Image (cartoon, rainbow, N blue to C red):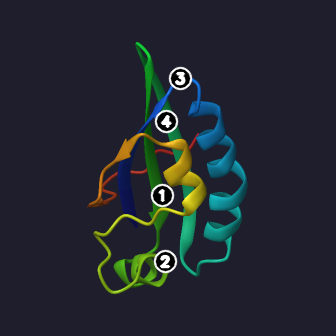
């Protein structure tokens, strides 16, 4: 399994907008991607800014490419995300999941 890790930052005022976008539009899109295995959105308040870390899980790098295209390290951001965030990482890191501890 592959974990795709990406970060973006929002002002405190726009952070809820980004979270709603992730919970609705991003979730709907990801659920349509073959090989999608789940996602987590982490949120950390840091003064007047909120850091979001998105961790999405895919069965393979081929499935990641099905989501991200031929350059899988390129971040995928919809217009709604660009409006809510003040900045974001342009590149994404991929990790092989070495241990998965279910509940």
Is tag 2's residue or tag 1's residue first in the polypeptide sequence? 1
Name the mark on residue 42. 4
Q: Residues within 10 Å of mark 3 (few under 14, many from 20)?
A: some
Is tag 1's residue or tag 3's residue first in the polypeptide sequence? 3
Image quadrant holding the N terminus, namely bottom left
Q: How far apart are marks 1 and 3 (CA)?
A: 24 Å
> Can you tell which quarter of the image residue 69 is in?
bottom left
Q: How crowded is mark 2: few (under 14 residues within 10 Å), some or many (20 or more)?
A: some
Identify whether 36 is placed above or below 87.
Answer: below
Q: How far apart are marks 2 and 1 (CA)?
A: 11 Å
Name the mark on residue 67. 2
Is label 2 in contact with label 4 (beta carbons under 8 Å)? Answer: no
Is tag 2's residue or tag 3's residue first in the polypeptide sequence? 3
Tell me where residue 20 appears, x and y as whole percent.
69, 43
Is label 2 in contact with label 3 (beta carbons under 8 Å)? Answer: no
Mark 4, secondary structure of its residue: strand
Is label 2 in contact with label 1 (beta carbons under 8 Å)? Answer: yes
Name the mark on residue 24. none
Lateral position of residue 9 relative to residue 36, left or right:
left
Q: Name the residue under label 3.
A: 12
Name the mark on residue 56. 1
Q: Residue at x 40, y 82 (%)?
A: 65
């Amino acid at each position: 399994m592959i974990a795709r890790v990406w970060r973006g930052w929002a002002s405190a005022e726009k952070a809820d907008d980004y979270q709603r976008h992730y919970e609705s539009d991003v979730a709907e899109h990801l659920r349509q991607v073959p090989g999608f295995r789940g996602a987590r959105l982490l949120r950390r308040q840091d003064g007047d800014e909120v850091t979001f870390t998105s961790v999405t899980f895919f069965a393979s790098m081929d499935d990641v490419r099905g989501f991200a295209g031929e350059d899988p390290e390129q971040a995928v951001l919809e217009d709604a995300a660009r409006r809510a965030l003040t900045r974001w990482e342009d590149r994404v890191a991929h990790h092989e999941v070495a241990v998965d501890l279910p509940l």
